[in-house]
Image (cartoon, rainbow, N blue to C red):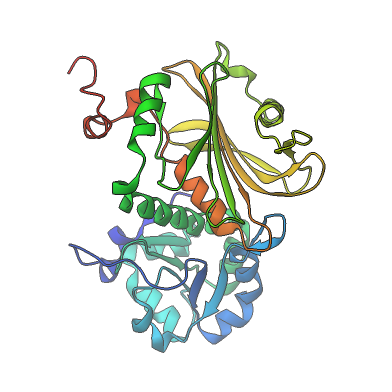
Amino acid sequence: MRFIVSFGLTAVLLIGCGGFKMPAAGPDDEIAVFADDTTWQTLEPILRRVFEDTVWTPQPEPWFTLKRVPFEEWGAYEKWKNRVIVGPLDGAGAVSSYITNSLDTTVRNLVMEGKEFVFNKYDSRARGQLLMFLTAQDLRTLGGAIGSNASELSYYFRRMSLRRELADVAEEAAYHKRDISRSLARNYGWTMTIQHDYHVAIDSAEARFFWIRRATPADMERWIFVHWRDIRDPGILTDQYVLALRDSVTRRFLRTVGDDAHVEIAPYHLKIENVNFLERFAYETRGNWRFSDKSGGGPFVNYTFYDTPTRRLYMLDGSVFAPRVEKKKLILQVDALLQTFRTVAELSEEERGELGLGKSPGK
């Protein structure tokens, strides 16, 4: 992954005002694109391929859709959630001129040398906002850089969407089920946020399995489970181990009411990567689950990692069952809750106080 220069440090003209900012406006899954005519005509296909990447749920859904906006309307979109401004430094249009004038000499030199081409600015005019600048010496170089870094560029916007979901979760703190979070911390040594409309489906200390469900509205379900086990050798963690473990856990616990089918990983559109999850090396698995009798299914996201201080393997998993509706927003919501996972040792004093756990040992 390329090193990303903080645009707020390198472009004085784009430094946001301090103090309180209102939430960003616009659709969460739409990116406003500003580009001169020549740039847009040349790069539109690759920009759509990069940012309108498909998530299979199992139906194809684009993560984002691009909306080209005339540069004359730049001011009207200054508080938009997702914006991209793209153009080469040698371009003759207003967008290229704006980009060139916004970069200081040091950064322009990095661009001309081909060392940098993407600069991100967060929360410049509103909370939960990402402004991405894409530039290079010329159009050909710029197109090549965008195509070579497609997954990275899309990731920034998906990560910002997740950050907004986490902000929404935090704003609902008064309604969270802290009694359940407290029980998890005291009984199992880890905890997570439990939103008010989730209920506990299974809580088994013996099996080391905790499962919560949300069924509102009635034709839409979100499931989150945590499974943990003590292991001495983290080297057992492999792609195959993660997939086999998830299938064994869901075969045992995620079963239909009649007990005649169970949840399993569907053998299509499956992706597993090594990621940094909450400052830990982890396996991130994204794909689709299905009932073993093929009667239904949906998307899931799974994080499996080894926690060195506790010598535990943790599997955190979120799934969605929502026929007939788009599911990318729903999978983002369960992903956000997985991001609230903490071991007791990681809790701040404030968080311990909120859960009624007292001060950390030694304090």
Q: Percent x, y for residue 205? A: 51, 18
**What number of labels is visible?**
0
Q: Percent x, y for residue 215? A: 55, 50
Looking at the image, residue 62 lies above or below residue 176: below
Q: Is residue 363 visible?
A: yes
Q: Quadrant of residue 219?
A: bottom right
Q: Toward the viewer: 166 or 273?
A: 166
Q: Toward the viewer: 308 or 113?
A: 308
Q: Outermost residue, top direction? A: 232
Q: Toward the viewer: 129 or 93?
A: 129
Q: Residue at x 55, y 10 (%)?
A: 232
Q: Outermost residue, bottom direction? A: 72
Q: Toward the viewer: 83 or 355?
A: 355
Q: Percent x, y for residue 26? A: 43, 73
Q: Is residue 87 visible?
A: no
Q: Percent x, y for residue 280? A: 46, 31
Looking at the image, residue 328 lies above or below residue 82: above
Q: Residue at x 68, y 30 (%)?
A: 239
Q: Residue at x 24, y 65 (%)?
A: 21
Q: Left or right: 199 with respect to 172?
A: right
Q: Quadrant of the C terminus?
A: top left
Q: Left or right: 1 with respect to 4?
A: right
Looking at the image, residue 257 lies above or below residue 54: above
